[in-house]
Amino acid sequence: KNQKKQKNGNRLSRSMGRGLRIILSAQLRATTTTTRGSAALRRPRLGGVSVARSRGTEESPRSLGRRWSGLGGSSEALERGTNKTLPDMLIACVGDVHGLWNRESEEALSWLQPDLSLFVGDFGEEDVELVAEVARVPERKAVILGNHDAWYSASPTRRGNSVALDGVEEQLDILGDDHVGLSAKTLPDLGLSVVGCRPFSKGGGDWKRFSKFYRQLYGLRNFDDSATQIVGNSFAEPEHHRLIFLGHNGPTGLGSSADSPCGLDFRPEEGDFGDRDMEDAIRAVLEKGRRVSLAVFGHMHERLHRFALPRTSRRMFHLDKSSGVAYVNCAVVPRIREAEGDPKATQHNFVLVTMTAALEVERVESVWLQKNQGDGSFERVETTEWYNRESG
């Protein structure tokens, strides 16, 4: 017990040493420290750039032949600092899992050959074993944990008088640097960085309910502390990098109707159920001149609650034309379904974001993949196009 108390104390002290009130200045761009949980993560330096790599991946498979139509990559854009041309980039987004991730899901993801995979959390009710399966996925990835991943630890009513965070701590330790909540992942070969927003978010504006949890784990006192941390981590990334924001829940400001990307649909009254700290952080980063290409999140499921009738489906994509930021809610739930006419076969959902070599969002699609039992390849059985830059 004393050892556990000492461990938590050390984690918190290191986080507080990092500083929650970060001054927005050019000096931030030179820092090499980010925080994961309450512990400071020192990332190796390569050529003056702070770098984090996923286990088993040294660089993006950009030169490999794609198994996805239309992604051959004939772009003439040059890789920064080289004379090599770059193909389009493919990002595979995995929506709220809720227990639906298995070996075939991993095979489908591998078949897609993405440059980057983004997981928005809600793997299960602190399902450590499932999180360990995701951690073993060899594809380069960034992960953020959701409210279900702190199902007991963050809820006073479920944990009783206990304040133990064992399940949360274990998941964070398993994911290691792949978990970007209140941290960042630097990807030099792609010319971008993934900035993690506040993990374990339940959405909405009630901080008080979870104040003890966030104070104990991250040293955060309010939404402003969280936004300040996210902004500081953003400016710690290389200045020439495009930024991708990853959250479990999305930001406020995308609409207040039940079918908006973060709209409140499970109560009779409608409203904006996004995260204020995420919106504030993105706005602050844009105002300081940093380029944000994409924000990916989940939590608010595509299928709407009956309170939203006659509307049944959520709008899952939003493009802010003034800033150019594309917002993608990838919470297609459930993400595994039975194939029609073949109860033994299953289909797996991924939201695919295609980006140009200039790191602009070109296309967003929700796809369902089914395995061909003969050769082990996968077939696209259903595609819903959410956005196409050519058609607007």
Image (spheres, helix red, strand yellow):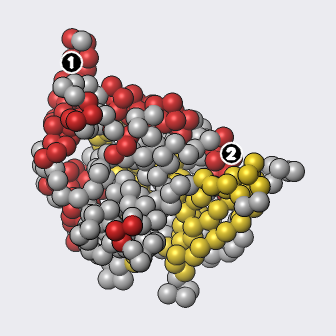
Identify residue type, mark 1: Lys
Identify residue type, mark 2: Glu
Asked if residue 57 can be seen in this view, the reply is no
Residue 357 found in image quarter: bottom right
Marker count (numbered): 2
**Position above or below: 118 against 176:** below
| Helix, strand or loop at mark 1 | helix
Quadrant occupied by the N terminus: top left
Q: What percent of the width, then of the height, locates residue 162?
A: 22, 24
Q: Residue at x 50, y 87 (%)?
A: 392
**Position above or below: 224 against 175:** below
Foreground mark, 2 or 1, reads: 2
Label 2 Cα neighbours within 10 Å, binned few <14 / some 14-19 / many ≥20: some
Q: Which residue is mark 1?
A: 5
**Position above or below: 98 against 212:** below
User: Which residue, as the protein is rendered here, is positioned at the far top?
Assistant: 2
Q: Residue at x 13, y 47 (%)?
A: 208
Q: What percent of the width, then of the height, locates residue 220?
A: 16, 43
Residue 129 is marked as: none
Q: What percent of the width, then of the height, locates residue 86?
A: 61, 67
| Along the line of sight, the residue nearer the viewer: 367 or 184 | 367
Q: Which residue is mark 2?
A: 104
Residue 295 found in image quarter: bottom left
* In contact (CB < 8 Å): disc 2 and disc 1: no
Lower sequence index among marks 2 and 1: 1
Asked if residue 211 can be seen in this view, the reply is yes
| Along the line of sight, the residue nearer the viewer: 337 or 253 | 337
